[in-house]
Image (cartoon, grey):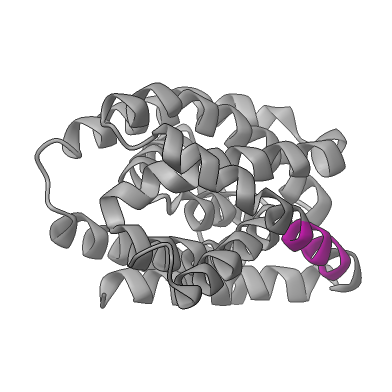
Amino acid sequence: MPLDNLWTWVLLCIAALGIGITKSGFSGVSMVHVILFAAVFGARDSTGVILPMLIAGDIFAMAIYGKHANWKYVRSMIWPTTIGVIAGWLLMFRLSEQYYRPLIGSIILGLVILQIVRIWRDDWFANVPHATWFVWSMGILVGLTTMLANAAGPVFGLYLLAIGLPKLEFVGTAAWFFLILNISKIPFSWSLGLIRMDTLALNVVLLPLIALGLWFGRILIHRIPQKYFDSIILILTGLASLRMLFQ
């Protein structure tokens, strides 16, 4: 879509607001900006347009919620996620999006179902979220999804939900984790030609709307009880996975 079109700018503004709301803890909302930016720039190019905006949102979220972060879970995910990012970067040179998006959607949907089962039967898989193999599997999946589709928010959100973090720790941990992760992705996106001066100029224009979305999300998270917060995360993540699966 051309950027001199009013409707295009409406979509971009909604997407920027969505980034801010996502960074306030509602990770499933991430599919809003993923879909809208892909509609404007194409799925592959949109990953480079979004990345600096995600970093800006991470900085805002870190400033507000960073003190609540649980660093144990940040550190445990860094190395497996790095492996996933490198694997995703290599796949972007040779794999068509029509193949990897349904695969990612299927995996995320499976994780949502697993978490729902755990809620009904908390004695099932009780030790799984803390097992080394589970942490590494989720970390690699986070790296793959963030590089291929900027869709790591729902995956990491499910991981934090599975280990039972309270909502403020949830947001603070995610803020620091994604700030580190997204900064590390810059050389990969740059090497693919996905970040350019014109995309950075667009990022600056949309920056205030990210802050506005984060402010709105902050109001919501302080008013929503923990059990409803957990349910919202699951519902939004499930919808995100279905969108990727049937796109």
Q: Residue furthest left?
A: 94
Q: Residue at 39% x, 62% y: name it.
A: 108
Q: Nearer the viewer, residue 201 or 27?
A: 201
Q: Please determine whether, in this image, residue 235 is positioned above or below residue 61.
A: below
Q: Is residue 215 magenta?
A: yes
Q: Please determine whether, in this image, residue 70 is positioned above or below residue 54.
A: above
Whether residue 50 can be seen here: yes
Q: Which residues are magenta?
A: 212-220
Whether residue 138 can be seen here: no
Locate residue 198 relative to residue 192 in the image: left or right: right
Q: Residue at 52% x, 68% y: name it.
A: 9
Q: Residue at 35% x, 27% y: name it.
A: 190
Q: Residue at 85% x, 72% y: name it.
A: 225
Please provide percent x and percent y for residue 148.
Answer: 30, 46
Please provide percent x and percent y for residue 202.
Answer: 52, 47
Please provide percent x and percent y for residue 61.
Answer: 76, 44
Please provide percent x and percent y for residue 74.
Answer: 63, 31
Q: Is residue 178 magenta?
A: no
Q: Residue furthest front?
A: 4
**Secondary structure character of the magenta stretch overall:** helix
Quadrant of the drawing holding the C terminus: bottom left
